[in-house]
Image (cartoon, helix red, strand yellow):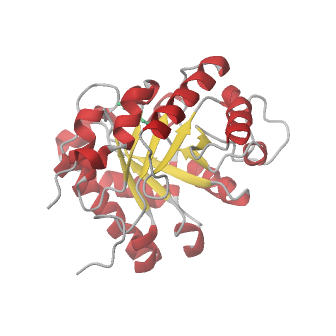
Amino acid sequence: MTTSTNGKFNRKPLIAGNWKMNMDHVQGITLLQKLAWTLADAEHDYGRVEVAVFPPFTDLRGVQTLTMADDLKVRYGAQDLSAHDSGAYTGEISGQFLSRLGCEYVLVGHSERRALHGESNDLLATKVAAAYRYSITPVLCVGEGLEIRQAGTHVEYTLEQLRGSLAGITKEQAETLVVAYEPVWAIGTGEVAGPEDAQELCAAIRNELSSLFGIDVASKVRVLYGGSVKAGNAAAILAQRDVDGVLVGGAALDAAEFANIVRFEHHLVTD
Ligand SMILES: O=C(CO)COP(=O)(O)O
């Protein structure tokens, strides 16, 4: 008998939309407004399922202004941050600036940052620490590429990324962490990991956090799945025991589609 008051979820599900390098600041406001209206029409209960968007840096001031003016319940965050606080780091954005812009979350170590910008686990550990310095919750992204998946070493590889990118954080910090498992071969390819694959890795990540930081961490940390999530496959993925949410790319650029993912419970078959 579980004491859960939120369906199968002991942890509040988080439905997150990573806009990547899409939506300029005008388009971004329109998208957020549409999303908020669609969810308001559907009487979405944000206390039950949390919603967050990750727009480009240049959209964040507009997103903040709209959120404050209309008292929106959608949370938001940035797609990256600097490991440094300030100084001669041309082109970088400090966690301090993000905090001033009302960001509650920041993506750290998205596979596109790891692959295209050579971000290592060591660097990412310093970015995770920077996020915590400004009380921003990191959404740490991990996940294997196709070759590793085919070699069958994906669990060990992903857990190694997890350990490396969390080096030096405290148990208290770990308790507020969000981890997103995003297998690279499933990102933007239409190739979605099966619900069982998502469950396997989300459970392995939770177990690893438990042995790294203690069991209560594992019961609090939310572990998301990302990679070709759409309204049509979200419910089955979110029905898995250890999947506490999804990190959505392409489908987050369409307000109606993303709202349907947020409302996944309406597509769940209850047991
Ligand atoms: O990378 C992703 C989210 O961060 C996933 O992107 P897609 O949903 O477009 O596959």
At a point 35% along the width and 43% down the height, the residue shown is 263
User: Where on the picture, by quarter, is residue 81?
Assistant: top right
As rendered, which of 164 and 103 lies closer to the eye? 103
Work out which quarter of the rendered image holds the C terminus and state it: bottom left
Work out which quarter of the rendered image holds the N terminus and state it: bottom left
Q: Residue furthest right?
A: 87
220 relative to 57 in the view: left or right: left
Rendered view: 155 above or below 80? below
Q: Residue 262: percent from the left, percent from the top?
A: 39, 42
At a point 34% along the width and 36% down the height, the residue shown is 260
Q: Residue 269: percent from the left, percent from the top?
A: 16, 52
56 relative to 162 in the view: left or right: right
Rendered view: 125 above or below 32? below
At a point 46% along the width and 25% down the height, the residue shown is 253
User: Where on the picture, by quarter, is residue 252?
Assistant: top left
Rendered view: 251 above or below 140? above
As rendered, which of 50 and 198 lies closer to the eye? 50
Rendered view: 260 above or below 264? above
User: Where on the picture, by quarter, is residue 13?
Assistant: bottom left
As rendered, which of 21 and 71 lies closer to the eye? 71
As rendered, which of 160 and 266 lies closer to the eye? 266
74 relative to 249 in the view: left or right: right
Q: Residue 104: percent from the left, percent from the top?
A: 63, 51
Q: Residue 178: percent from the left, percent from the top?
A: 48, 56
Report the number of discs: 0
At a point 55% along the width and 45% down the height, the residue shown is 108
For ligand 1, give the image quadrant: top left
